[in-house]
Amino acid sequence: MIRPLLLLLTLLAAGLAHAEADVATGDALFKRNCGNCHKVGQGARAAFGPQLNGIIGRTAGSTTDYRYSPAMKDSAVVWSPETLSAFIKDSEAVVPGNKMRFWGIGDQDKIDSLLLYLQTQPAQ
């Protein structure tokens, strides 16, 4: 239970977490919005999209078990809470020409919860 609290404190210190952000909400959002294409957790591998373990701090297009679009590989984006938040809102605005087909999430509280959940999924 300490790890999610530390992650929330980290996001709060960065000014990114709203009062409504929580891991359980992020887990539910991941399952509903992301889980059909992306995997996380022990043994996660690429599926229709790349696995997302340890995504914060990772360079876009860098996992070896997924075929990324040239736009993603050439983007030079490093996934931070800010860049990932913007990508979740509008992937095409952040990386034009990427292959992810997702309408986006406009509610920042939901994005913050999703980011908090993703940060509980360490790189493997």
Image (cartoon, rainbow, N blue to C red):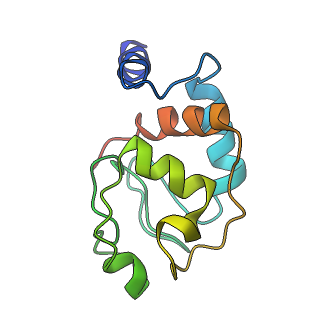
Q: Nearer the viewer, residue 20 or 14?
A: 14
Residue 68 in view (yes/no): no
Residue 91 image offset from top left, x and y in percent: 56, 65
In this image, 61 relative to 100: left or right?
left
- Residue 99, by quadrant, is bottom right
The residue located at (57%, 39%) in the rendering is 114
Residue at the extreme front = 93
The residue located at (64%, 36%) in the rendering is 108
- Circle count: 0
Above or below for 95 versus 58: below
Residue 96 image offset from top left, x and y in percent: 51, 77
In this image, 92 relative to 82: left or right?
right
Image quadrant containing the N terminus = top left
- Residue 93, by quadrant, is bottom right
Above or below for 58 versus 101: above
Residue 10 in view (yes/no): yes
Q: Nearer the viewer, residue 75 or 113?
A: 75
Above or below for 30 versus 47: above
Residue 103 image offset from top left, x and y in percent: 72, 63
The residue located at (58%, 22%) in the rendering is 18
The residue located at (65%, 20%) in the rendering is 20
- Residue 69, by quadrant, is bottom left
Residue 47 image offset from top left, x and y in percent: 51, 71
